[in-house]
């Protein structure tokens, strides 16, 4: 299959082409049944001759080209309707009735606050052009009206509030929120790309529209992405400030599977400047080695790194409710645990050459001994709760 993507260097185009090329190169294991021979990437620096040749050869067209922020309002119609017309004329020139996808906008509804949108009128004209083309040629046409898009590589200070907020907060720049209660319906770029690949495989989602509302309809003349998220501007900014504070708090925000927070966090990270990609951690050092907290999670505890110098024994304490995992990743050590009130000791010889996870059991006093005379013992430690100095649940007691 040969695929033409117009607007290939735009926000959606870059993400889509990157994923299509992964499939083409055999790097995407989730779409092993899809074979892509070529991805033709058309943009402003492409030539008319390239567009002509690619329209002749392609088996599917993603038309993402368009104008969002012209200097003159008249450029909306020229950039959105005009190019779409040229594209379809070129396909007709070669009798190429391959499926064609059109990237449109909710503004094409021309309802509510979009009732007098020049951009919306240009998008609606493009939609009508494509739908008429489908009737004329019998080609499959997929018209998508996108809501507010966000994700990596989206330009800040352009047409995405999320991109602007992410960029400015990541770079310590001011933001302006006039009304925190304003709610946005948001579409994440990876969810959009997944729908585009579904469309490529003849599995697109169809709908009709009631104003701005999507009405799923298997035979609908429009298409839509089934996964969107609603969030207020205030909620978005609050989450972004939590993300920005993570290097100081070590707190990983709650990011449930497929949640808006998870997708927003990934988006935020893509805007970090070089000087924030790495950040220092506080190493608590003494003559025995060091102990460094890495990550905190509100409901899931913390992860730390413990380094013990040769011959050193650490621990020698027990907990009522707190429990831990000790995972030796480098060196050679011995872990001992003794149930309080007994003399029975359970022992585990551990090494970075054979990584295993050892439970530190509640009600058992425990230690970890570096058996090497020359090498440090490096242990990853997980604890089911964040350390609270006012309620440490840690009581010193030797194993032996």
Image (tube, helix red, strand yellow):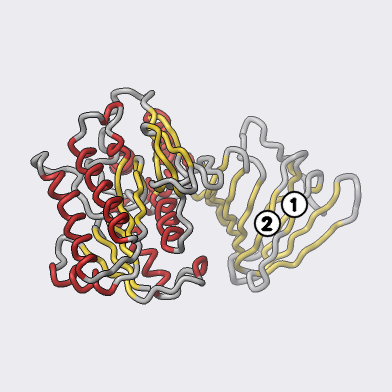
Quick one: SS at disc 1? strand
Q: Position of residue 123 (x, y in %)?
A: 24, 44
Residue shown at 24%/58% (left/top)? 7
Q: Badge 2 local density, few (<14 within 10 Å), some, or many (20+)?
A: many
Camera-side residue of 250 and 76 = 76
Camera-side residue of 163 and 313 = 163
The numbered mark at residue 49 is none
Q: Badge 1 local density, few (<14 within 10 Å), some, or many (20+)?
A: many
Instruction: Tell whether label 1 touches label 2 (CB within 8 Å).
Output: yes
Q: In the rendered view, does 392 fall on the left or right side of 259?
A: right
| Residue 351, placed above or below residue 112 | below
- Give the labeled residue for mark 2: 326
Image quarter (top left, top right, bottom left or bottom right) of the C terminus: bottom right
Image quarter (top left, top right, bottom left or bottom right) of the N terminus: bottom left
Q: Position of residue 160 (x, y in %)?
A: 29, 41
Residue shown at 37%/45% (left/top)? 268
Camera-side residue of 292 and 214 = 214
| Residue 312, placed above or below residue 392 | below
- Give the labeled residue for mark 1: 360
Q: In the rendered view, does 51 fall on the left or right side of 230?
A: left
Q: In the rendered view, does 228 fall on the left or right side of 83?
A: right
Residue 307 visible (yes or no): yes
Q: Position of residue 41 (x, y in %)?
A: 26, 66
Q: Earlier in the sequence, mark 2 or mark 1?
A: 2
């Amino acid at each position: 299959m040969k695929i033409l993507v117009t607007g290939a260097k735009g926000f959606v185009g870059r993400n889509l082409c990157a994923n299509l090329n992964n499939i083409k190169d055999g790097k995407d294991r989730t779409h092993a049944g899809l074979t892509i021979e070529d991805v033709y990437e058309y943009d402003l620096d492409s030539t008319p001759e390239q567009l002509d040749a690619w329209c002749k050869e392609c088996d599917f067209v993603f038309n993402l080209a368009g104008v969002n922020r012209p200097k003159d309002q008249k450029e909306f119609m020229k950039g959105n309707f005009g190019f779409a017309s040229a594209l379809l004329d070129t396909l007709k020139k070669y009798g190429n009735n391959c499926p064609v996808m059109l990237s449109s906008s909710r503004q094409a509804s021309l309802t509510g606050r979009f009732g007098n949108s020049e951009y919306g009128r240009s998008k609606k004209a493009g939609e009508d052009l494509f739908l008429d083309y489908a009737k004329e040629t019998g080609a499959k046409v997929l018209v998508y009206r996108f809501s507010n898009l966000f994700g990596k590589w989206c330009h800040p200070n352009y047409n995405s509030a999320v991109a602007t907020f992410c960029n400015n907060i990541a770079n310590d720049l001011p933001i302006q929120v006039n009304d925190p209660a304003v709610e946005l319906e948001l579409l994440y770029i990876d969810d959009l790309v997944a729908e585009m690949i579904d469309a490529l495989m003849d599995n697109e989602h169809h709908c009709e529209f009631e104003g701005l509302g999507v009405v799923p309809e298997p035979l609908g003349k429009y298409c839509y992405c089934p996964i969107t998220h609603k969030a207020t501007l205030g909620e978005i900014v609050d989450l972004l400030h939590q993300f920005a504070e993570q290097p100081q708090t070590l707190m990983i925000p709650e990011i449930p599977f497929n949640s808006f927070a998870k997708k927003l966090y990934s988006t935020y990270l893509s805007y970090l400047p070089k000087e924030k990609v790495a950040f220092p951690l506080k190493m608590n050092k003494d003559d025995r080695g060091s102990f460094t907290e890495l990550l905190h999670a509100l409901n899931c505890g913390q992860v730390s790194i413990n380094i013990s110098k040769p011959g050193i024994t650490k621990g020698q304490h027990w907990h009522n409710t707190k429990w831990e995992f000790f995972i030796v990743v480098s060196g050679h050590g011995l872990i001992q645990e003794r149930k309080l009130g007994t003399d029975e000791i359970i022992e585990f010889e551990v090494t970075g050459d054979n990584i295993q996870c050892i439970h530190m059991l509640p009600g058992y006093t425990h230690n970890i001994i570096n058996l090497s005379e020359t090498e440090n013992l490096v242990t990853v430690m997980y604890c089911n709760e964040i350390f609270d100095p006012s309620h440490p649940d840690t009581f010193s007691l030797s194993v032996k």
